[in-house]
Image: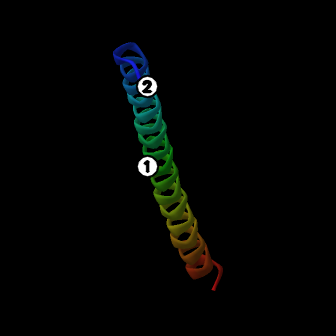
Amino acid sequence: MSDEELKQLIESNAKTAQAMLDSMAESRLERQKLREGMVQLQNAVKQLIDVRAIIDKFMI
């Protein structure tokens, strides 16, 4: 393998590795956003449960 071929192979591998790292970072960000959304949903459900409990108290 010539020096030029080796250089091209190294550059290609570096680009592939960088693309994989970028993809992993994107996936990590998407999972973080999903977790944050799930926490917001849990909080909203808890608030609805609390409101329902208050309404039930007044209905008695």
Q: Which residue is mark 1?
A: 32
Q: Amino acid at mark 2?
A: Leu
> Local crowd at mark 2 within 10 Å, few (<14), some, or many (≥20)?
few
Quadrant position of the C terminus in the picture: bottom right
Q: CA distance from mark 2 to mark 1?
A: 35 Å
Q: Residue furthest right?
A: 59
- The earlier-in-sequence mark between 2 and 1 is 2
Q: Amino acid at mark 1?
A: Gln
Residue in the image at 34% along x and 17% along y: 3
Q: Position of residue 50 (x, y in %)?
A: 51, 71
What secondary structure is marked by label 1? helix
Classify 50 as above or below 26.
Answer: below
Classify 48 as above or below 33.
Answer: below
Classify 26 as above or below 3.
Answer: below
Quadrant position of the N terminus in the picture: top left
Please name which of the two marks, 2 or 1, marks the residue nearer to the observer: 2
Is 13 displayed left or right of 51 in the figure?
A: left
What secondary structure is marked by label 2? helix
> Local crowd at mark 1 within 10 Å, few (<14), some, or many (≥20)?
few
Q: Which residue is mark 2?
A: 9
